[in-house]
Image (cartoon, grey):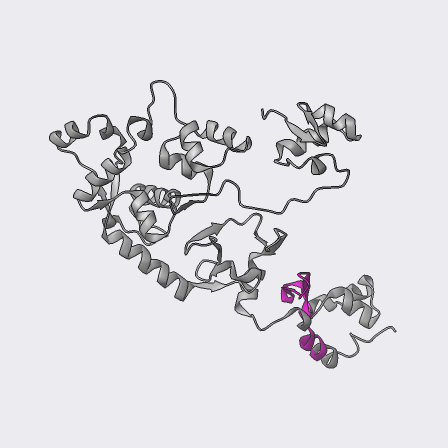
C-alpha cells in the first residue's frame, strides 16, 4: 500500500485521518483520492467532486521509443511487473529508474542484470543472420513491441497473415550452432524463438500505407484522432505523435470515443458507419422526436395510435454531434417534411 505523506500549510501529515480531521472531511474520501493519484492538498480536502481529465495509463517514452503500456515496457526489459506497478503508484515513473528498481531478484536474472550490453549482443547476433529483433522491427515501423509480439504469436499459431501486414515468410526460426551457443553462454536462453527477416519492414509499411489510403476513413469528430476500417467496421485510434494505430474494442455493440478534454461519447456501430458514410449530414439537419412532438402537438399515445412509427422508424434516425459537442438524434428534416406533405391526415397537428 502506498505510504501517506502530505505537507500542507507548514504541517506534515503521515496519516490520512489526521489530514481529514483537521479539515473536516471524511477519512475514506482523503484516502481514496490519495490512492487514486491526487497529491494536491487542496484537492484532497476539497468538499467538491473532483474531475480528473483522462490520460492514457502507463505511457512511457524511453530512448526515442514510446511504450503504450507499462506491461509492454517491462516485457521489453525483462522487469518485474508487480514491482514496476508498485513503483508507478508511488510516483517513480522515469524509465531509467524503473529499470534500476524493478529487476527480478534471486535465481532469475534479467537481460540487463547479466550485462548492459546483452540486448545489443543478441541483436548483433540476429543482424549477422540478416534478422531483426521485435524491438528493431518496432523502431523501423513505428509499431509497439507488444503489438508485434501479439501478431507474431497469431502467425505462428494459425499460419495466417497478420493484421499488420506480416506474412509467414517474414518470420524465421532462430537456430544456433554449437559454437554460437558457446559464445553466447547464458545469453543463449534470452534469444527469441523467432525473429524477423528484413523484408518484414517493407511488408508492414506497405500494409500501413494501403490501410490508410483504402480502408481507413477519418471519423469526422475529435480532431481526426479516430479512424474507421470500412472493410470490417472496426474503429482505430491513432497513437499520439506516432504513425501507428490502436484498435478500439466495442462493448455491447458500442464504441467509446474521447474528446481532447477526456469526455466520453458512445456510438453504436451502425451510427459510426453512418457518420463516416454520410459526412454531409450535420446536427442542424436533424429533428428529434421531442422537437417533432412539440411542433405537431403530439403525445406518444397519439403517435402510436396513428402508427406514425411505421413511417418514421427509429432505424431511420441519424446521430450527430452539434457545435457544442451535444449528441443529437433525429430524422432528416426534409424527409419529415416530405412525409407530412404526403400524409397530411396522419400528421395533422393538434395545436
Vertical comparison of 40 with 327: above or below:
above
Q: Quadrant of residue 50?
A: top right
Residue at the far right in the pictured view: 351
- Residue 171 visible in the shown view: yes
Q: Position of residue 101 (x, y in %)?
A: 43, 27
Residue at point 23% right, 36% down?
121
Out of 268 and 92, give the one closest to the viewer: 92
Q: Is residue 302 above or below residue 205?
A: below
Q: Is residue 146 left or right of residue 116?
A: right
Q: Is residue 91 magenta?
A: no
Q: Residue furthest bottom?
A: 341
For image coordinates 41% across by 29% down, the residue present is 100
Quarter holding the C terminus?
bottom right
- Is 330 inside the magenta-drawn segment? yes
Towards the viewer: 196 or 335: 196
Name which quarter of the figure residue 326 lies in: bottom right
**Residue 132 versus residue 113: which sits nearer the camera?**
113
Viewed as shown, does residue 220 lie left or right of 305? left
Extreme residue in the top direction: 106
Q: Residue at x 66, y 37 (%)?
A: 40
Residue pictured at 43% horizontal, 37% vertical: 95
Q: Position of residue 279 (x, y in %)?
A: 56, 70
Q: Is residue 158 visible?
A: no
Residue 199: percent from the left, percent from the top? 23, 53
Of the 4 image quadrants, the one containing the N terminus is top right
* Magenta-colored span: 311-338
x and y percentages locating residue 220 in the rendered image? 55, 65
Amino acid at each position: 500500500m502506498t505510504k501517506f505523506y502530505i505537507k500542507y500549510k507548514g504541517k506534515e501529515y503521515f496519516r490520512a485521518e489526521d489530514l481529514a480531521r483537521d479539515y473536516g472531511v471524511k477519512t475514506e474520501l482523503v484516502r481514496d483520492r490519495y490512492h487514486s493519484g491526487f497529491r494536491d492538498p487542496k484537492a484532497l480536502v476539497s468538499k467538491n467532486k473532483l474531475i480528473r481529465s483522462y490520460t492514457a495509463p502507463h505511457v512511457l517514452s524511453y530512448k526515442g521509443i514510446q511504450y503504450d503500456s507499462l506491461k509492454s515496457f517491462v516485457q521489453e526489459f525483462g522487469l518485474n511487473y508487480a514491482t514496476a506497478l508498485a513503483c508507478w503508484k508511488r510516483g517513480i515513473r522515469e524509465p531509467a529508474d524503473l529499470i534500476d528498481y524493478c529487476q527480478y531478484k534471486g535465481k532469475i536474472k534479467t537481460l540487463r542484470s547479466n550485462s548492459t550490453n546483452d540486448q545489443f549482443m543478441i541483436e548483433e547476433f540476429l543482424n549477422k543472420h540478416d534478422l531483426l529483433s521485435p524491438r528493431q522491427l518496432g523502431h523501423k515501423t513505428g509499431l509497439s513491441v507488444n503489438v508485434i509480439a501479439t501478431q507474431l504469436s497469431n502467425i505462428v499459431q494459425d499460419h495466417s497473415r497478420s493484421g499488420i501486414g506480416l506474412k509467414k515468410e517474414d518470420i524465421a526460426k532462430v537456430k544456433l550452432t554449437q559454437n554460437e551457443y558457446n559464445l553466447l553462454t547464458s545469453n543463449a536462453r534470452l534469444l527469441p524463438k523467432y525473429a524477423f527477416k528484413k523484408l518484414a519492414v517493407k511488408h508492414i509499411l506497405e500494409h500501413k500505407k494501403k490501410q490508410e489510403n483504402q480502408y481507413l476513413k477519418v471519423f469526422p469528430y475529435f480532431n481526426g484522432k479516430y479512424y474507421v476500417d470500412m472493410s470490417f467496421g472496426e474503429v482505430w485510434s491513432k497513437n499520439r505523435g506516432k504513425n501507428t494505430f490502436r484498435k478500439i474494442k466495442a462493448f455491447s455493440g458500442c464504441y467509446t470515443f474521447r474528446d481532447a478534454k477526456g469526455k466520453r461519447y458512445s456510438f453504436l456501430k451502425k451510427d459510426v458507419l453512418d457518420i463516416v458514410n454520410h459526412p454531409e449530414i450535420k446536427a442542424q439537419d436533424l429533428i428529434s422526436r421531442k422537437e417533432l412532438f412539440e411542433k405537431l402537438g403530439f403525445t406518444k399515445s397519439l403517435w402510436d395510435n396513428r402508427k406514425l412509427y411505421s413511417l418514421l422508424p427509429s432505424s431511420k434516425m441519424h446521430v450527430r454531434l452539434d457545435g457544442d459537442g451535444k449528441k443529437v438524434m433525429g430524422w432528416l428534416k426534409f424527409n419529415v417534411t416530405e412525409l407530412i406533405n404526403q400524409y397530411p391526415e396522419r400528421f395533422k397537428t393538434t395545436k
